[in-house]
Amino acid sequence: MPILNILLIVGISFLIYGVAIYAVLSHLKTSSESLLNSLKSKFIKRSDSLEGLIKLIEPSLKKNDKTIKELKDFLSKKENDLLKQVLVQNNISKKVAEIFSKVSKDKDLNADKNFKRLKSSFEKDTKEIESVINKYNSISSSINEASEEFPKNIIFRVLKITKIEKINL
């Protein structure tokens, strides 16, 4: 009889542990999905603000500037896959940085309040995107590490929880 009680206590303890781990993993999974939705909306917001920035900057650059053309090409890409969107957004960031460098000596443009506002907005959006990606990657690491630890890996298999791919900046 005492062995049966011990087995019952161990079984109940394992069940409680499993429920607690499931709750934590569910929260992490929900948080990661929420961050991905936030990331998508930030991409849209930043892309929308870039169109106004391009209109302001274009006259300050040489005609048929290659960087502006490449930026417009990136903006026209509509990717459904989030990881591909991140790559496109990274390329957009690089092209905008090149453009900011090219127009840095244009005193009239840099004095323009609308340009300052759009540039500041773009830089703020970029920092927010990086922050969301870092939070997402942190959650991804937590989930992926838990999937390899005993006994959490058993709970992963039973509940059919999968690893989450990280986003590379």
Image (spheres, rainbow, N blue to C red):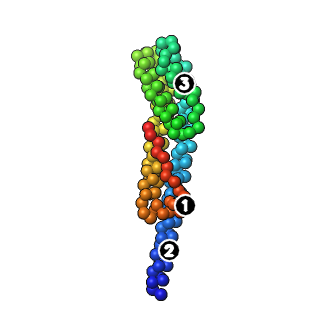
Amino acid identity at mark 1: Leu
Q: Is residue 117 visible?
A: no
Point out the frontmost of discs 2 and 1: 1
> How far apart in space, not on screen, are marks 3 and 1 (Cα)?
43 Å
Callout 2 secondary element: helix
| Residue occupied by mark 1 | 159
> How far apart in space, not on screen, are marks 2 and 1 (Cα)?
18 Å
88 shown above or below 148: above
| Residue occupied by mark 2 | 12
Q: Position of residue 38 (x, y in %)?
A: 54, 42
Q: Position of residue 150 (x, y in %)?
A: 42, 63
| Number of marks | 3
127 shown above or below 76: below
Amino acid identity at mark 3: Asp
Amino acid identity at mark 2: Ile
Look at the numbered discs 3 and 1 and tell me whether their residues touch, using CB distance below 8 Å.
no
| Of residues 122 and 21, the one drawn nearer to the viewer in this rendering | 21
Q: Position of residue 47 (x, y in %)?
A: 55, 30
Q: Residues within 10 Å of mark 3 (few under 14, many from 20)?
A: few
| Of residues 108 and 16, the one drawn nearer to the viewer in this rendering | 16
| Residue occupied by mark 3 | 73
